Amino acid sequence: MHYRGGFVSNLKFRCLFDKYFCNIVPFKPYVEKEAIDEGIVLIAFDENELDTIRGLFKENICNENISSLDNIQLEGSDGYLYVLSQTSIEKKNKMPHSIEKSYSYFKNYNKKRNRTNSKIKKELSRNDDGIKQLSNGILSAYKFFDKENDICFPFRFHASKGTNKPLFIFFHGAGAMGDDNIKQLFDNIPLYNQVLKKDCNILLPQAPFGSNKNESVTRRYINSLKKLVDEFSIDFDRKRIYIVGTSFGGLCVWNLAYLFPYYFAAAVPVMGCLSVYCDFENYDITRLVKTPFWVAHSSDDTNVRIDSDDYFVAELEKLKADIKYTRWNKYGHKMSSKFYKTEKWAEWCLSKEVTI
């Protein structure tokens, strides 16, 4: 078996399969560990079985979340990462941590996500649809129940002192997901402090745990957020709704603007993406022209690749859209704090309003 840059010999491999492959009979001879309830299995096999594994992946790859067999990540018995594609196997760098550690992480992650889903179903069955206020104050606590989208989530709201003021919606990163209605506050402190000085309304939703790992949950959350804004009976200027988000929050911003053109006055996705699957050609770019964008990303970001932002910004520029692009090269996935502190993104947003 050849790989780019050398020759593989006498190696054993291990890799993880997600829930879509857990019940596939041909994999059972290779299963080393399994956590079916958590939707993950760890398999091991010899070098001479690489073609078999590749074939099984190709045969069973067709489902709504996995559209192509781009690569399969393997741990070699020599401690290196190998990437198996349809035509070759490529040796990469030393594994940063063992596949055992990844298995334990995903097992615990999926277990927590399953508990979250069960809790959401129970809460939806016990509560009526709509907004429920939990506390009052500078940052009042609420929870939104949405049976249509099969989701509920908490949020905080700061009301402006004046009437008919703009609304900023801040979307947190994956690390702030949950149900405590607190983590998203710390994730958005730099944003909150800047906008607070301008007497604006501020909405701080908290996505359910695991939303970033499931496209269906992400879409339900995004649709439900739009529904929340529609139903929220608070006085604010509906021609000046601004959406700002970091990482997973940036993904939410891109998708909200795409799904609901003419609704948001401006969008600021930082270290986000519209598509994680690189299926850029499947999107109708003209839908994004309706919303002014200020996109920010760093080319050395290893958490969220910059490819999506580069592509959609370039396409929007061709269409003469209202778009700004802050593209740095040395801040990785930590550029957001510098961007929010040094750039006048809030003033830029406030200069925009929906015009139809």
Image: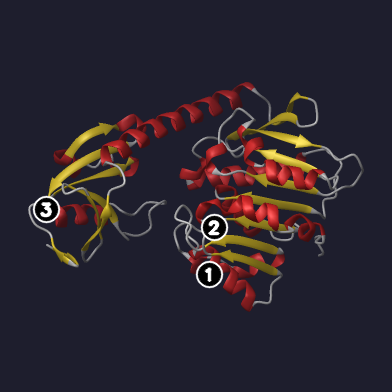
Residue 33: x and y, percent?
A: 22, 33
Residue 166: x and y, percent?
A: 83, 49
Q: CA distance from mark 3 to mark 1?
A: 38 Å
Q: Nearer the viewer, residue 80 or 309?
A: 80
Residue 12: x and y, percent?
A: 13, 47
Circle 3 residue: 47
Residue furthest top as drawn: 126
Circle 2 residue: 273
User: Hey, what amino acid is under mark 3?
Assistant: Glu
Circle 1 residue: 311
Residue 277: x and y, percent?
A: 44, 58
Q: Quadrant of residue 310?
A: bottom right
Q: CA distance from mark 2 to mark 1?
A: 10 Å
* Residue at the spot 67% in from the left edge and 67% down from the top edge: 324
Q: Secondary structure at mark 3?
A: helix
Q: Is residue 317 left or right of residue 55?
A: right
Q: Nearer the viewer, residue 5 or 269?
A: 5
* Residue at the spot 63% in from the left edge and 53% down from the top edge: 338
Q: How is the image coloured?
A: secondary structure
Mark 2 or 3, nearer chain start:
3
Q: Secondary structure at mark 2?
A: loop
Q: Secondary structure at mark 1?
A: helix
Residue furthest right as drawn: 162
* Mark 2 residue crowding within 10 angstroms, few (<14) / some (14–19) / many (20+): many
User: Hey, what amino acid is under mark 1?
Assistant: Tyr
User: Hey, what amino acid is under mark 2?
Assistant: Cys
Mark 3 or 1, nearer chain start:
3
* Mark 3 residue crowding within 10 angstroms, few (<14) / some (14–19) / many (20+): some
